[in-house]
Image: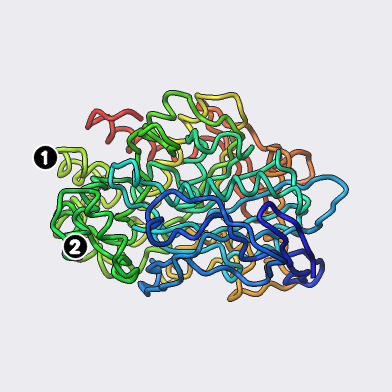
Amino acid sequence: MAKVKVQPGWLAGEKLDTVTKDSQYYSFKGIPYAEPPLGKLRFKAPQPPRPWEGVRSATEHGPKCPQMDILTNQIDLGNEDCLYLNVYTPEIKPPSPLAVMVFIHGGGYKSGSGNSDSYGPDFLVSQGVILVTLNYRLEVLGFLCLDTEEVPGNAGLKDQVAALRWVKANIANFGGDPNNITVFGESAGGVTAMLHVLSPLSRGLFNRAISMSGVPSCDWCTPFMQTQRSFILGKQLGLETDDPHVLLDFLQNQPVQSLLGTNPTVMSFEEIGDHLLKLYHFTPVTEKDFGQEHFLTVSPQEALKSGKINDVDVFIGHTNEEMLFGISLYEEFFIRDCNRHSELLVPRKLQMTCTPEQVLEIAKRIRNYYFNGKPLSVDSMREFVTYFNHSSFVFDIQRFISNLSKVGKSRRYLYSFSMESERNVFAKGGLKYGIRGASHIDDMMYLFSNSNLPLEKNTREHDLVKLACVVFTNFAKYGNPTPDSSLGVTWPLYEDITRPYVDIGDNLTYRNNPYPEAIKFWRSIYAYVGQEY
């Protein structure tokens, strides 16, 4: 047993072996970082945690937040009392304070948790950092927006801010350095890491940020008519009202299961285009400013353009074949529907802002550029993966770092992730089409231990895991993925002329100017409709 004192009281954790049995770490799970958001606190910003008497056991995870799993479409009721975090440290009293990495899980703001079955700490703590993982409210519970002072939106992001405040105040007691905290995340978690870079509410709570496979302009996290969507949800559940206070009272009294996996579409195109890559109904929003603590009251694009950001070091990138995890969607959905309605190929954020004539013209250009104008079929799987790699991830991520590099004075680094091994479980759908690479989520298998994916020492996979973890923990420790020559490459600072980056594969490989033709094509699309790059 290991005891640590934090502001609300004493915790009793445990000392565990890593999965490879070559080191140990201290584990403290299920630590409450906010008051349970129950009853009249449902949908609202989190409140500080309550103190406890005696010594609280910290050997089990807190409950998952209620959710519908986006990969299985299964409901997990979890518990609304779910605002817990986990701290894993190699040493409680190290010779000098350790760098801290706070991980925000992905799942489209709709599912996921920080639990160790998916995000085990073994690989990262072995590199001498402290890892913190956390739960935050999801879907409507975390992202209902009524445009009122009580519920302006972004409660799930404010949960994360509460967790960061907790880490800042308490991590020294676990051996951590409160002045060397890195926020990092993948997919929706990567989007959120960049939102923390933009948010005034997060100022001073972290020193570095890593975005893996997600930025705020990605199609699958773009908000659309979020307040109206909330009233449509009320209508679906049996309430006709235009009063947000009446709606709030109604929704606060609904059983949690009625709020999960709902489909409150605003426009008919959302009904047809409702699938894993296009639409998440409850997402981060730009809040109205009611003079209270707010996460973001201007759009991410405006915040970035203004330069009023948290000027921290940033490490940003994506996998080389993001969309391999979506092959079954193509087989089941796109061949049928996109041949009939080609406008479904148009990014949702353009569908929401362009005229029908523009949308159809963009669809035509996409068909010609990626599919040579041919009907979509299983024979065009390679083209499909490339199209969605670019339209859902690559272009937005490249555009974000291009614009970020123009503001602030901190260091920015760009990467691509292309490791391949048996750990690439999400890429396996591409093998029957002869497509290999690192899919969306596959990079997580190299940074976190997973209960379904063992790792043996003295194997190629073990070497790859170590390389990936050294790169990411180097950035957390030093603000540079390659602070010395030990990895055989000097990581270049990003600049917008040669656009240098490093590919993380079997080795680290320096490269320039990624995806030039695709970037040129998508820039032409946005220029066609008069939108800035």
Question: Which amino acid is tagged 2?
Answer: Asp
Could you tell me residue 280's position as x and y percent? 32, 55
Percent of width and height locating residue 237: 20, 65
Residue at 49% x, 68% y is: 64
Question: Would residue 54 be found to the left or right of residue 397 on screen?
Answer: right
Q: Which one is in front, 516 or 257? A: 257
Q: Position of residue 32 (x, y in %)?
A: 59, 60
As displayed, is residue 303 above or below residue 433? Answer: above
Dots 2, 1 in contact, CB < 8 A:
no
Label 1: which residue?
357
Crowding near pointer 2: few (<14 within 10 Å), some, many (20+)?
A: some
Query: If the image is split into quadrants, where does the C terminus sit?
Result: top left
Q: Is 497 on the left or on the right of 59, as rendered?
A: left
State the separation of the CA atoms marked 2 and 1.
19 Å
> Which image quadrant for residue 96?
top right
Residue placed most toward the observer, 317 or 485? 317
Q: Residue at x 88, y 48 (%)?
A: 95
| Sequence-first tag of 2 and 1 | 2
Q: Residue 138 lies in what quarter of the image?
A: bottom left
- The quarter in which the N terminus is drawn is bottom right
Q: What residue sits right under mark 2 in the picture?
A: 337
Residue 489 pos. (x, y %): 71, 41
- Classify mark 2: helix, strand or loop: helix
Q: Is residue 462 left or right of residue 118?
A: right
Identity of the amino acid at label 1?
Glu
Question: Which of the pair 46/525 is nearer the observer?
Answer: 46
Q: Residue at x 38, y 29 (%)?
A: 302
Mark 1, other Cα within 10 Å: few <14 / some 14–19 / many ≥20: few
Against 301, residue 381 (above or below) is below
Q: Is label 1 in a helix, a strand or a loop?
A: helix
